[in-house]
Amino acid sequence: YKAELIHARPAWPSVTEVEFQTMNWVDWWNNKRLHEALDYATPTEIEAAYYQSQNAEPALT
């Protein structure tokens, strides 16, 4: 995060701009970037698949 976003820009105009760009970076990281360790899926896709698998299993009574 710091290397890709914060340190890539020598000066930021405001704290608000840093917060806004951080929000965009986190969205990209979790929803768009394909992670090699996740078999080239996004964290959001992995999380959705996990919860879907939990809901698909029959409940034990």
Image: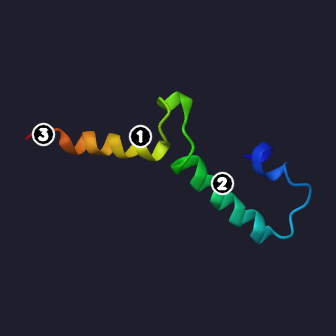
Please rate how many residues cluster around mark 1, counting C-alpha atoms within 10 Å: few if below 14, some from 14 to 19, many from 20. Answer: few
Residue 24 horizontal/vertical position (percent): 64, 59
> 11 left or right of 27?
right
Circle 2 SS class: helix
Q: Which mark is residue 58?
A: 3
Circle 1 SS class: helix
Circle 3 SS class: loop
Q: Which residue is mark 1?
A: 46
Residue at the image position 53 percent from the left and 28 percent from the top: 37
Residue 27 horizontal/vertical position (percent): 57, 55
Looking at marks 3 and 2 on the same chain, the residue that comes earlier in the sequence is marked by 2
Q: Please name the amino acid that badge 1 sits on.
A: Ile
Q: Splitting the image into 4 quarters, where does residue 19 fall?
A: bottom right
Q: Which residue is mark 2?
A: 25
Q: Please name the amino acid that badge 3 sits on.
A: Pro
> Do the residues under discs 2 and 1 have CB atoms within 8 angstroms?
no
Residue at the image position 27 percent from the left and 44 percent from the top: 52
Please rate how many residues cluster around mark 2, counting C-alpha atoms within 10 Å: few if below 14, some from 14 to 19, many from 20. Answer: some
Q: Gap between marks 1 and 3, in whole Å?
A: 21 Å
